[in-house]
Amino acid sequence: MLTPAQRDSWELRGYFVVPRFAPSLLCDAMLARAIEIARLAAGGNPPGRALVTAEAKPNPTARNPEERVSKIFRLHRDGVFNEFCTAPRVLDLIEGILNVDIDCFLSQFIFKNQGAMGQPWHQDSFYFPFSKAPQVGLWLSVTRATLDNGCLHVLPGSHREPVHAHVPDRRPQANYGYLEIVDHDMSASMPVLMERGDLLVFHSHLMHRSLDNLSNGIRAAMVWHYTPAGTIDRSAEKFGRAAIVNDFMPVRRTGRGA
C-alpha cells in the first residue's frame, strides 16, 4: 500500500509527504465549508457535531467570523471532510501503516489567520491516552504552507521517542489546549514546506510545532487522525474528563484485528 520511499521515510523519520494528493477544487470546497460552518456557529447554529474554537489572540484585521476562529473540530462526519477521510486511496495509506481495521477519531480544520500564533513543540500521543498505538495523522495543506505563514516544523526520527512530559504553553494568549515539550533538544528540526493539496502523513509520537503566521494571508489546513479499531479512549483517566474533541467513527473493516 505504501511505496518503498514512503515506507523508508515512515520508519526512519516518522512521516512522509505525498505531493499534490488533493486537487485545488477540493481544497476550495473544504475552505468554503469551513467558512460556512464558522459563520453558522457565529449565528448560534453550528451544524452537526462541529466544535468551533476562537483564536485567543485578538485579530485587529478581522471582519468576518472565520477570521476570529482558530480551529473547527469534529468534522469527519461532515460532507466533503467525510468524503476525503473515507476515500479508499486515503484509507489505503493508513492501512499500509497500521495493517488493521481503522477508526477515524479526530478531525480539525485549522484557519491560522494573519497574526495567529503557532503551536509549540508537542507529540499528538500526549493528547491520545489510548489502549492502542500508534495513531496516524493526515495534514492536508489547503493553502500553501511557507516559512512566512507558519508551516509545520518536525524533528525527524523523534517518533522513536517515548511520550515526553508536556507543560502548558507559557505564552500569553495561547490557544485552547496548547502544551509544549521543554525537555528535548530540537536543534535538528526542519520545516515542512507544502504546496496546496500536499498531504503530510505522520506518526503520533513525532515531535512537531508551527510558528506564527507573519504573512498577510491565511495558512489553512485540514487534519484527520486514525487509530486501530477497538481502541479505548482513556482521556478521562489521564485528564479527569473525557476528550470532547474525540468522535470515534469506523472507516475500514476488513476483519483484521489489531
Image (cartoon, grey):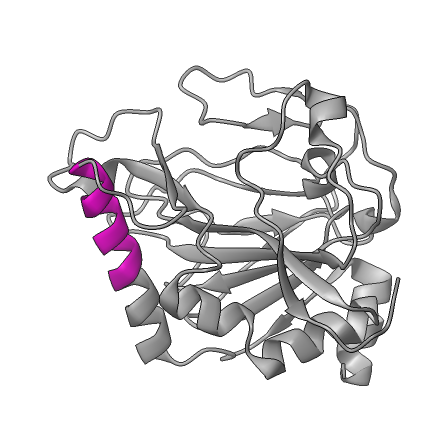
Give x and y (percent) for residue 105: 61, 52
Of 54 and 20, nearer the camera is 54
Q: Which image quadrant: the N terminus?
A: bottom right
Q: How would you classify the magenta stretch by its main secondary structure?
A: helix
Is-magenta flag for residue 33? yes
- State the image quarter where residue 250 is shown: bottom right
| Left or right of 116, for residue 18 | right
Give x and y (percent) for residue 170: 55, 15
* Residue that appears at 65% across and 64% down: 201
Give x and y (percent) for residue 19: 55, 77
- State the image quarter where residue 5 is shown: bottom right
* Residue that appears at 30% across and 38% down: 69
Give x and y (percent) for residue 128: 71, 39
Position of 247 relative to 18 (above/below) = above
Of 8 and 129, nearer the camera is 129
* Residue that appears at 34% across and 31% down: 55
- Residues drawn in magenta: 32-43
Position of 213 relative to 137 (above/below) = above
